[in-house]
Amino acid sequence: MDNLIIGANGQLGTELRKLLDEKRIDYTATDSKELDITDKVAVETLFDKNTPKYVYHCAAFTAVDDAEEEPGKGLNQKVNVQGTKNVAEAAEKIGATLIYISTDYVFDGNNTGMYTENDQPNPKNEYGKAKWEGEQIVSSTMSKYYVIRTSWVYGEFGKNFVFTMLNLAKTHDKLTVVNDQIGRPTWTRTLAEFMLYATEKDLEYGLYQLSNEDECSWYEFAKEILKDKKVKVLPVTSKEYPQKAYRPKHSVMDLSKTKSTGFKIVDWKEALSKFLENVD
Ligand SMILES: NC(=O)c1ccc[n+]([C@@H]2O[C@H](COP(=O)([O-])OP(=O)(O)OC[C@H]3O[C@@H](n4cnc5c(N)ncnc54)[C@H](OP(=O)(O)O)[C@@H]3O)[C@@H](O)[C@H]2O)c1
């Protein structure tokens, strides 16, 4: 068996399954009930039995604010650090290639330019710290791996900012959205395509950053999502909209390395418009 997707029922895992189905590529997929990555023996047993060539690691604890306090804090550690360690060790043991997804929250967001793969992470929230630890576990454990850092992920399958805005617009005349956090939205389709591209093209192993092109604030993102709706979108500052977990002010990731592989990245407005065609 060539392809194993773990955490396969999340928004990215489901998108990746859809992409492989479309391309008629065989895979095995496990959700958190079929394979709990915090269970080291279960991970090892499944990997030893299936001996996948590629392990697409889409499992994560992604509740960023919950990760700041117990019980979320412990779960964040358990899944994102210990779980990833279990996956990396079991994958290395059978000689698999691991595809691990990380986040722009590994950066503090205090710069004004773009972060490259060579910049030193300095995560400020618990989730970002755990994902950065996960990156280091993967790069120190694995011989064959792709760490793909992404940001502001949305897609057809799961909870995300785009669905939240569309739902709120049904019941509100006016929405306020933060305008002082800048980043790059990522459609799960673009991300799933790059994960497959990396393995199919046998790209050089290592760290890659991937989002859609161009940057925006959450306010600008919301305006674009709701441009055909009647609701009014108003900008606010992060101070006016406090959140439990620290959010980077400017976490725009440089995409040159990923683009230099020949992978074509559409800009975020075009990606969003394609996404909305199917869900709106
Ligand atoms: N969402 C974003 O904005 C964002 C941004 C940057 C990076 N990322 C990264 O992108 C990747 C995919 O995220 P996503 O948006 O697809 O997240 P998601 O929708 O929350 O999916 C995560 C999946 O992981 C599963 N999972 C949780 N604990 C598990 C465990 N112990 N064992 C096995 N599976 C477990 C969850 O299953 P249950 O639902 O059954 O618990 C869920 O299906 C993650 O690595 C995430 O850190 C996401």
Image (cartoon, rainbow, N blue to C red):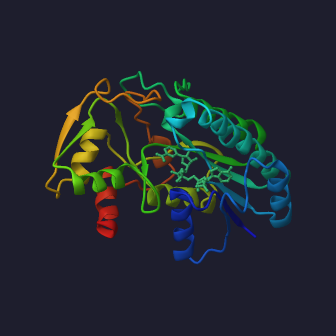
Residue farthest bottom in this picture: 24
User: Is residue 228 shown left or right of residue 132?
Assistant: left
Q: Is residue 104 visible?
A: yes
Q: Residue sitting at 46 percent across and 48 percent down?
A: 259
User: Image height check: is 124 above or below 197?
Assistant: above
- Front residue of this view, candidates 81 and 2: 81
Q: Position of residue 18 (x, y in %)?
A: 52, 70
Q: Residue sitting at 26 percent across and 53 percent down?
A: 225
Q: Position of residue 127 (x, y in %)?
A: 56, 34
Total count of labels = 0
User: Is residue 242 shown left or right of residue 9?
Assistant: left
User: Is residue 227 shown left or right of residue 148?
Assistant: left
Q: Is residue 217 visible?
A: no
- Quarter that holds the C terminus: bottom left
User: Image height check: is 94 above or below 181?
Assistant: below
Q: Position of residue 41 (x, y in %)?
A: 85, 52
- Front residue of this view, candidates 97 and 230: 230
Where is residue 143, by image quadrant? top right
Q: Residue sitting at 27 percent across and 27 percent down?
A: 237
Q: Position of residue 1 (x, y in %)?
A: 76, 70
- Front residue of this view, candidates 185 and 62: 62
